[in-house]
Image (cartoon, helix red, strand yellow):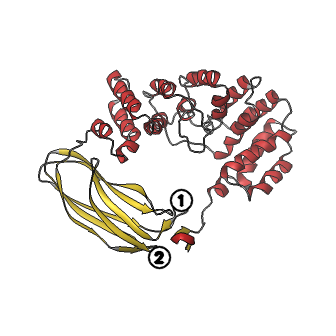
Amino acid sequence: MSTKTANNKITAGKSFSLKDRLFNADTVDLLAQGLSRAYPDFKSKAYQAEVLRQFQSLELKACIECMADALVDYLPKNYSQAAKVLKQALPEPLDPSLSDDDFGDFIWSVPSEFAARQGCTDKRLKTSLALLKETTKRFSAEFAIRPFLKTFPDATYKFLEGCAQDKNYHVRRLASEGIRPNLPWGLKIGLSTAKTIAMLNTLHADRTRFVTRSVANNLNDISKTDPEAVLDALDRWRASDQQEVSELEWMTKHALRGLIKADHPQALLALGYPIKPGFKLSEVKVAETVSTGDSLEWSATLTSTARQKLKVLLRVYFLKANGTHSAKVFALKDRSVDTGDVVALKKRLPFKPMTTRALYSGEHHVELVVNGVACGRKTFILIEK
């Protein structure tokens, strides 16, 4: 179901709520049970009633803040004692024998948030950081560490240097994820690129994908402002021969994905794609119009004129409210070819309104991008069904 508003804006109706799935009576009760075990005087029913009453009007992150703020009235007034209760309330740490995709239960972000909101003071710093080291073993404290980096940059950075050497991979990941320049939802911390990469130098050879993915995401963030620093770091790590070759190749590809979409020549070369590929494009076909709710069928034929590695993308320029266009890139092919190889290309592009992106009826564009070289641009019109 979609709704059309002014300026030809076509939006999707709301259907799924991540907030309601993560924070509800059951998950709040899980938190309250842990607190009750650790602190017999905890007024569980009153706490749950107070926070659940507020959830309906709050967004996801505000729910976490609400639960953390409400704890002030239900935990011991002494901060050290309150931190001790929160630590004792935590469930068993996440399985240390795993290496990836073990995120834990979102409700255990609340103790971390409490530390960030109540414990980011000089007097409480040591206690708070020790608590975050424990909470991140149950659910990442990447957001909660950032106020400390902002207020106490030197002491917190030193703490994270220790985390980077910890035997628990969730603690090691905090040292990378917590300092990302563009952490979604995260407070801006202003850590220099040099200090960020210095931390990643310790973590890049980690043997767990949970950590190396964070390192790669961190580099992808840095690449938006300092691509040369990212490429230099990857070259240095490759020369050091500390990381398994296949893992470093995966990290490099993941770290440079933003630069590849931006047609950055050095990033393309780093991944083995020639920046002057030899090919011929023919039979580019696309409908002149597409209706909202339908899909646009695009196809073309690429003939290679050299032996080479090709990264083939489709770039769609979506019309914006102000009449300009924003580009979104879709992957098509990533393969090695020989001279004379013929590659059939096709893509079905759905034009269904989503809550994350509004559609605007009018002129859109689509083009092929081969190793950073754009070609075969076509225009089509989006119309409301």
The single residue placed furthest to the bottom in the displayed view is: 385
Whether residues under marks 2 and 1 lie with C-beta atoms below 8 angstroms apart, the answer is: no
Disc tally is 2
- Quickly name the residue at label 2: 384
Q: CA distance from mark 2 to mark 1?
A: 19 Å
Which residue does the image show at 71% across and 23% down from the upper left?
A: 126
Q: Which mark is residue 245?
A: none
Q: Amino acid at mark 1?
A: Thr
Which residue does the image show at 40% across and 41% down from the upper left?
A: 254
Which residue does the image show at 25% across and 42% down from the upper left?
A: 273
* Left or right: residue 23 compared with residue 179: right
Name which of mark 2 and mark 1 comes first in the sequence. Answer: 1
Q: Is residue 327 above or below residue 192?
A: below
Examine the rendering and report whether any part of residue 74 can be seen.
no
Screen quadrant of the N terminus: bottom right
Q: Is residue 245 above or below residue 103?
A: above
- Quickly name the residue at label 1: 356
Label 1: how many Cα within 10 Å (few below 14, some 14–19, many 20+): few
Q: Amino acid at mark 2?
A: Glu
* Left or right: residue 380 compared with residue 139: left
In x, y percent, where is residue 338?
Answer: 14, 48
Q: Secondary structure at mark 1?
A: loop
Examine the rendering and report whether any part of residue 343 can be seen.
yes
Residue 103 placement: quadrant: top right
- Mark nearest the camera among 2 and 1 is 2
* Left or right: residue 160 compared with residue 348: right
Label 2: how many Cα within 10 Å (few below 14, some 14–19, many 20+): some
In x, y percent, where is residue 4?
Answer: 55, 73
Q: Secondary structure at mark 2?
A: loop
Foreground residue, 321 or 369? Answer: 321
Which residue does the image show at 70% across and 39% down from the upper left?
A: 113
